[in-house]
Image (cartoon, grey):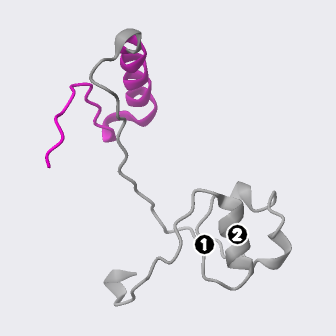
Amino acid sequence: MANQGLGMRVFVDSQDIEEQLKLVASGLGLGLVPHEFLNLSASHDQLTIIEVFDFVLTIDVCLVYGKALGNLGKTLGTLAATLEEKFGPSLKVSTVPRTAVA
């Protein structure tokens, strides 16, 4: 959108998909949700669905953990290996603790 000179103002950022769909059904904006959630929504009949095929969503996430892992050390290693296996070379996983910079 930005490369077309269009802006977007985020009014609500919700992890609750049903809440987001209720807001959209009430006329309070637009929503991007996984298609499989639409048929389960109580607001389904109040929504107009536009299929988007050329949209790529990327997100940066991080796994955080405390300095004292205790018996979670092995679990952290297994999780990192599983993520690398599922997401391939595009995922960079490091289990080296980093110090937060203020």
Q: Is residue 81 magenta?
A: yes
Is the residue under label 1 in contact with that under label 2 (CB below 8 Å)?
yes
The N terminus lies in quadrant: bottom left
Residue 95, position as x, y percentages in the image: 27, 25
Q: Work out whether 69 lies above or below 18.
A: above
| Residue located at (39% from left, 54% from top) | 59
- Measured in 3D between alpha carbons, the distance from the residue under mark 2 to the one under mark 1, in whole angstroms, is 7 Å
Q: Work out whether 90 lies above or below 45.
A: above
| Residue located at (34% from left, 82% from top) | 2
Residue 61, position as x, y percentages in the image: 37, 46
Q: Which residues are magenta?
A: 73-102
Res 75 → quadrant:
top left
Secondary structure character of the magenta stretch overall = helix
Report which residue position mark 2 lands on. 21
Q: Which mark is residue 31?
A: 1
Q: Which residue type does callout 2 highlight?
A: Leu
Q: Which mark is residue 70?
A: none
Label 1 CA crowd tier, 10 Å (few <14, some 14–19, many 20+): some
Q: Which residue type does callout 1 highlight?
A: Gly
State the SS at label 1. loop
Q: Is residue 42 magenta?
A: no
Residue 71, position as x, y percentages in the image: 40, 9
Near-viewer residue (14 or 82): 14
| Residue located at (72% from left, 57% from top) | 37
Residue 33, position as x, y percentages in the image: 62, 63
Sequence-wise first label, 2 or 1: 2
Res 34 → quadrant:
bottom right
Q: Work out whether 5 lies above or below 40.
A: below
Res 77 → quadrant:
top left
